[in-house]
């Protein structure tokens, strides 16, 4: 059997208290509507009594419309106290990238998207500085510079929200955007805004973590990608990685090595989100493979 194209696929993510009959109920529902399960993954957290599942589906032989399917899922969800999300394979998610002056994560995301590693559209790049405008324009992507005023941050963010709404943005990536975003942005894009922090959280939060690491004499440095929340650098963690360093490494060495980690960690986190492989529970994530 040939594999379905994205417009004929969907992914459902569910989380709920763990109890018998969950898997069977969802599988029977999908089968009854003519839907074929392409793959399914599940996880049970015994300490929290929580169940998590991701099901990727083939909709080519579905004999109801999407509204009917969603109502049927909602009925099962009510019965099992499920939190659920249904994501269709088409159209592609639209991703906005936010940057300040560092360009390494920006380049990496754009090149991976162009190579087909990140299945999304990048309609805009936004910055609070003009420096990366020529770089972004060289990729043929519209660049929007929205300078920040210390006494009126909300004015800039209101322009940002209008821009995101006009461009139908699904996910926001803070690719070394060196500003603390407002609670309103955190709320509007809850579990849809991803930040890269240049340390292995929870160590060295806040500014200049490589300088903190050098002062502390650490033997590893890391990077952490997480969802953005009102609690600075404390959002649900999507991806992390580390590399060894030594007493011979200067602060500049740590920064150089760390940038390689930042690129890899951020791209893996973004890919997991774009592929609907992430569930959040109690400020933690379940990231399916």
Image (spheres, rainbow, N blue to C red):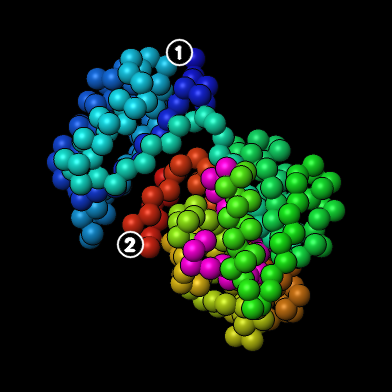
Q: Position of residue 117 (x, y in %)?
A: 63, 39
Q: Main secondary structure of the magenta part?
A: loop
Q: Is residue 246 above or below residue 9?
A: below
Residue 218 among those drawn in magenta: no
Left or right: 191 with respect to 249? Answer: left
111 horizontally vs 194: left or right: right
Is residue 95 in view? Answer: no
In the rendering, which numbered label is found on residue 49?
none
Q: Quadrant of residue 39?
A: top left
Q: Which residue is mark 1?
A: 1
Q: Quadrant of the N terminus?
A: top left
At x 20% / y 55%, what residue is drawn? 49
Q: Earlier in the sequence, mark 2 or mark 1?
A: 1
Locate residue 101, reporting x and y percent: 76, 65
Residue at the image point whose x is 75% and y is 51% from the top: 143
Query: Crowding near pointer 2: few (<14 within 10 Å), some, many (20+)?
Result: few
Q: Nearer the viewer, residue 269 or 194?
A: 194
Could you tell me which quadrant the C terminus lies in? top left
- Whether residue 185 is visible here, answered yes or no, is yes
Q: Nearer the viewer, residue 234 or 156?
A: 156
Drawn side of residue 43 relative to residue 134, left or right: left
Place residue 32 in its image quadrant. top left
- In this rendering, the answer to whether 213 lies above or below 101 is below
Part of the protein shown in magenta: 168-185
Taking 119 as reference, is 232 above or below it?
A: below
Q: Is residue 212 above or below residue 273?
A: below
Q: CA distance from mark 2 to mark 1?
A: 40 Å
């Amino acid at each position: 059997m040939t594999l379905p194209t994205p417009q004929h696929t969907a992914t459902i993510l569910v989380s709920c208290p763990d109890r018998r009959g969950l898997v069977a109920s969802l599988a029977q529902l999908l089968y009854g509507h003519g839907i074929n399960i392409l793959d399914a993954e599940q996880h049970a957290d015994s300490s929290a009594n929580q169940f998590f599942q991701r099901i990727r589906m083939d909709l080519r032989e579905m004999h109801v419309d999407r509204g009917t399917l969603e109502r049927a899922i909602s009925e099962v969800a009510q019965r099992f106290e499920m939190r659920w999300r249904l994501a269709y394979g088409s159209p592609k998610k639209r991703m906005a990238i936010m940057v300040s002056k560092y360009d390494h994560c920006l380049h990496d995301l754009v090149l991976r998207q162009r190579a087909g590693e990140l299945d999304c559209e990048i309609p805009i790049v936004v910055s609070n500085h003009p420096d990366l405008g020529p770089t972004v324009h060289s990729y043929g992507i519209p660049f929007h510079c929205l300078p920040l005023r210390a006494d009126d941050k909300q004015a800039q963010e209101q322009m940002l929200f209008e821009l995101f709404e006009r461009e139908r943005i699904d996910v926001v990536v803070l690719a070394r955007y060196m500003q603390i975003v407002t609670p309103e942005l955190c709320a509007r894009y809850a579990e849809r805004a991803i930040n890269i922090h240049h340390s292995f959280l929870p160590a060295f939060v806040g500014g200049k973590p490589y300088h903190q690491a050098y002062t502390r004499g650490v033997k590893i440095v890391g990077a952490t990608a997480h969802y953005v929340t009102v609690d600075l650098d404390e959002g649900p963690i999507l991806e992390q990685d580390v590399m060894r360093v030594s007493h011979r490494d200067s602060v500049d060495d740590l920064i150089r090595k760390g940038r390689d980690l930042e690129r890899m960690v951020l791209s893996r986190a973004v890919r997991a989100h774009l592929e609907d492989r992430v569930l959040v529970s109690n400020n933690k994530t379940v990231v399916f493979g």
